[in-house]
Amino acid sequence: MQKSNLVRDRDGWETVSSETHFATPHLALATDEVRTPTQRAGRKWSVVHRKPAVVIAPLTREGKFVLILEERIPIRAAIWSMPAGQIDETLEPNEEAVRAVARRELREETGYELAPGAELTPLGHYFTSPGFTDEHCYFFLARPVQKCADGAQHDDTEAIVDCREFSADVMRQMIADGEIRDANTLSIWARLVATGEIFP
């Protein structure tokens, strides 16, 4: 699997070798040997190379966020989260391709779409768990959104069991209570607060 353009050798970083042990269309497990700016002898590290993704914060005209409740097999639980999805077209697509994926995932997972005159505002990206993977997600604020006439269109790999609107105050309490514990959702919430889109 090709590596992300956001993760490349520069400024004293050098990949000595990379051995792939396992690969699927969505991820690859490899052992990378890398020289860092402070460790010139090289260091071996197990890395999961994974396609980038999008995370969308859908906000209605009434100021409510749209969340999905999705069953997650690795943690054996259904959890509330912002809609998100992998970018399958290319590993490092252009901005318009990333926006298209964000619009698609919003519609498929929630059954909502951008209202006429709405904005899809980019909020940067983040690395989901840089201790073991190069996966990164692009953040978008979709405002305002409205329900689609034909509803959600989940694909066969998803187990979305509910979709609801929540006010910022309710979401804040859900985070404080540990009811929202998805890294993507917590991270985009922090970005929304930091950029002043919502108030803490």
Image (tube, grey):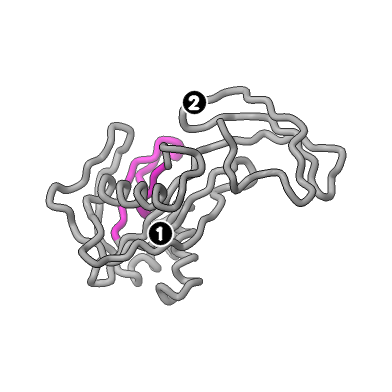
Q: Establish if 99 lies above or below 86.
A: below
Binning the other alpha carbons within 10 Å of mark 1 as few (below 14), some (14 to 19) or many (20 upward) gives: many
Residue in front for this viewpoint, 143 or 192 = 143
Image quarter (top left, top right, bottom left or bottom right) of the N terminus: top right
The residue identified by callout 1 is 140
Residue 57, image x and y in percent?
36, 60
Q: Residue 89's quadrant in the figure?
A: top left
Q: Which amino acid does label 1 sit on?
A: Phe
Q: Give the range drawn in magenta.
A: 66-86
Horizontally, residue 78 falls left or right of residue 178, namely: left
Residue at the extreme top of the image, as rendered: 21
Residue 172, image x and y in percent?
40, 68
Residue 74 is a magenta residue? yes
Residue 37 is a magenta residue? no
Residue at 46% in and 63% down: 123
Horizontally, residue 41 falls left or right of residue 67, namely: right
Residue in front for this viewpoint, 4 or 178 = 4
Image quarter (top left, top right, bottom left or bottom right) of the C terminus: bottom left
The residue identified by callout 2 is 24
Q: What residue type is labelled 2?
A: Thr
User: Tag 2's secondary structure?
Assistant: loop
Residue at 17% in and 48% down: 151
Is residue 80 at least partly visible in the picture?
no
The tag earlier along the polypeptide, 1 or 2, is 2
Q: Establish if 70 lies above or below 196.
A: above
User: Tag 1's secondary structure?
Assistant: strand
Q: Establish if 114 lies above or below 156.
A: below
Distance from Cα at disc 1 to Cα at disc 2: 27 Å
Residue 3, image x and y in percent?
59, 37
Residue at 21% in and 46% down: 152
Horizontally, residue 103 falls left or right of residue 5, namely: left
